[in-house]
Image (spheres, rainbow, N blue to C red):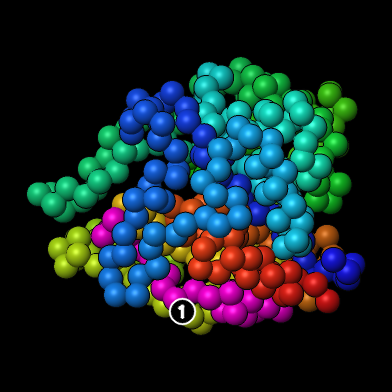
Amino acid sequence: MEQKNKKARVIAFYLPQFHPIPENDKWWGKGFTEWTNVAKAKPLFRGHYQPRIPADLGFYDLRLPEVREAQAQLAREAGIDAFCYWHYWFGNGKQLMERPLQDVIRMKQPDFPFCLGWANHTWYKKQWNSQVSRFSQEKLIEQTYPGISDIDEHFYKMLPTFLDNRYFRLHGKLVFLIYDPFSIPYLERFMERWQELAQINGLPGFYFIAQVDAKTISTEVNKLFDAVNYDCIRNLFNNSRIRRLIAYTIKRPIVKPYKSLLRKYDLSVIKSNRVYPTIYPNWDVSPRIGYIASVLHKSTPQLFEQHVNQIISTLVDKPNDDKVIFLKSWNEWAEGNYMEPDLKFGKEYIYALRRAIYE
């Protein structure tokens, strides 16, 4: 591809779910991966694009280095600068789905930048209970914060990752995103201690990013961070218990046209230098939770390109180091937000992103 000036750097969230693990075998059945829900999805209303079937990469297994290399090549074609691997640390040394990244570090391949996003939340088995008109939630694994010793253990477990020369940096520091900063009881101490440990171990320090929405973007906690990643999807749908009950009763998900994303994205929020917006190729969680899902309907590569151009227009006055966009996501197939080729659109979303971010 011809080298041109980029209008923004793009960091794509990356889900490491696509390989079997013992916990998923126990909770969902032998051999379960994200593909299980993707493959069994069905259209829930007229014109609903389901199931979504992968094209070029097929129903891949992330334990295969050939798959990870092919993903990196597609990401390069799209103009993506780095993958942000979702990282699961539940406390007391417990991780899940860590193997793909561990293999990337051990094998030194693919030669593609990456960073970490700590998905610090408890996992639940969710289903709608019509008798009480709410989610029935069975706790699968709890996110814990055992104390100061766990801060050090967490850092040193991930130190080989931080020392890798592919680790993505902003403002010269290692990018580390936190999904739910508000739940960490010793957040300030956590961040201070990791900066201390970074210095001790010859690292340049961390560039901490909090993921926020419209309700949390102005909280005092965010002042502790170097930047915030603004995620507007929850505010776009704003699904209440009553709305979910109605959706369950009439057997139709909560549906909004993809074009509404272009109209309702609060562009004023993302003009600040330290606010990094999120772009969305699509959104559809019905493969996971059926009729109580929220769905963006009729996304196309052309509309996605308009969306990206709209977001990029807000970055023009920012310093180059802060012209940063997060992409949700590279491969969240069961949420309908993915860039990888499918049977309907092929690589058209990849081409759309590339056109939008290059001069």
Nearest the eye: 352 or 64? 64
Q: Would you say residue 292 sits in the magenta stretch?
A: yes
Label 1 secondary element: helix
Q: Residue furthest left?
A: 131
Residue 43, quarter of the rendered image:
bottom left
Q: What amino acid type should be assigned to the residue bearing mark 1? A: Ser
| In the rendered image, the vertical position of residue 287 relative to residue 208, given as above or below | below
Question: What residue is shown with label 1?
Answer: 260
Residue 200, quarter of the rendered image:
top right
Q: Residues within 10 Å of mark 1 (few under 14, many from 20)?
A: few
Q: In screen coordinates, is 260 left or right of 245? A: right
Where's residue 143, x and y in %? 45, 31
Nearest the eye: 183 or 75? 75
Image quarter where the C terminus lies is bottom right
- Magenta span of residues: 290-314
Residue shown at 51% from the left, 46% from the top = 59
Residue shown at 59% from the left, 37% from the top = 62
Where's residue 14, x and y in %? 60, 47
Image quarter where the N terminus lies is bottom right
Is residue 309 at all visible to an observer of this figure?
A: yes
| In the rendered image, the vertical position of residue 313 relative to residue 123, given as above or below | below
